[in-house]
Image (cartoon, rainbow, N blue to C red):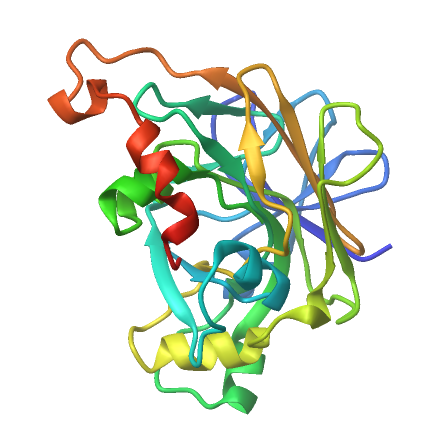
Amino acid sequence: MAQRYVRVQSQAGPLHYGLLQSDRTVRVLDAPPWLQGEVTDTVLEADNYQLLAPCAPSKIIAVGKNYAKHAAEMGGDLPEEPLLFMKPSTAVIATNTTILYPPQSQRVDYEGELALVIGDRCIDCNEDMARDKIWGYTIANDVTARDLQARDHQWIRAKGFDTFCPLGPWIVRELNPEAKLQTFLNENPEPVQSGEISDMIFSPEALVAYISQIMTLLPGDVVLTGTPAGIGPLAIGDRVRVEIEGIGSLENAVQARPVPAQLFPMDSLDSGEAMDSMESQSW
């Protein structure tokens, strides 16, 4: 089994990076693994820690329409270069924690994705250099308020709500380029999304190189590589699970987010008009 690098919080309070063992104990590292963290003598028992998202990125750079079939289902032509957007670090949550469905939206979608974890400062890289900057791989769910995306004609609000970036459960160093990515809803054994990593239009190293020529990527930053075809809505009460061969599974339940004391006036309007225009948007 590939080594699984985790980030945990012990019952005593401190945060640790570590290596997850087959008996679910964690061998604690003295620093993040991409900063040459070494194994210490400290071992956390399985009932003595909480599993967190496996890194705490300064930023999350995401890529739209990076699978041809997904690009087709969203409308418009295939991108000639990577289509980038950002999610805030405050959107990150761990596996088995809750996605909060915001009252401002009437349509929240799942988007299962492969996530890259950057291991070294990355600026103005070519693809060969970028390949060496990818420290490891984990799973993400690029949760999206689809009606708000249509209404706003840009993506920051639709992609940026707290809890809209489940990440985990751990990081592995290597991944089969033919690995399958699948997304499941509730107890349905049939996936709602299914694709292979090799189906990407732009490869992981091409994405990292492209991004590095725009902004500096820092150790621990995350790149979301796009989602296969089959995106669809989540409902309050659902459980969504994203699986990638060679990594594992990321699972989260969906609950209603409490209604703020005062919503922005536009958020109290019917979202039907925005929903009707979804098919005509080129995201």
30 over 275 or under it: above or below = below
Count of numbered tags: 0
**Quadrant where the image shows the C terminus:** bottom left
Give the camera-side residue of 98 and 22: 98
Q: Residue at x 56, y 90 (%)?
A: 128
Q: Residue at x 44, y 36 (%)?
A: 164
Q: Is 64 left or right of 2, judged from the image as shown?
A: left
Q: Measured from the top left, where is residue 245 in percent x and y?
A: 80, 54
**Quadrant where the image shows the N terminus:** bottom right
Q: Residue at x 47, y 59 (%)?
A: 75
Q: Measured from the top left, where is residue 79 in percent x and y?
A: 45, 74
Q: Measured from the top left, where is residue 158 in percent x and y?
A: 34, 40
The answer to whether residue 159 shows anywhere in this view is yes
Q: Is 249 left or right of 123, judged from the image as shown?
A: right
183 over 185 or under it: above or below = below
227 over 83 or under it: above or below = above
Q: Is 268 left or right of 33, judged from the image as shown?
A: left
Q: Is 65 left or right of 28, judged from the image as shown?
A: left
The answer to whether residue 37 shows anywhere in this view is no
Give the camera-side residue of 253 and 109: 109
Q: Measured from the top left, where is residue 270 in percent x and y?
A: 27, 21
Question: Quadrant of residue 202 in the image?
Answer: bottom right
Give the camera-side residue of 53 and 114: 114
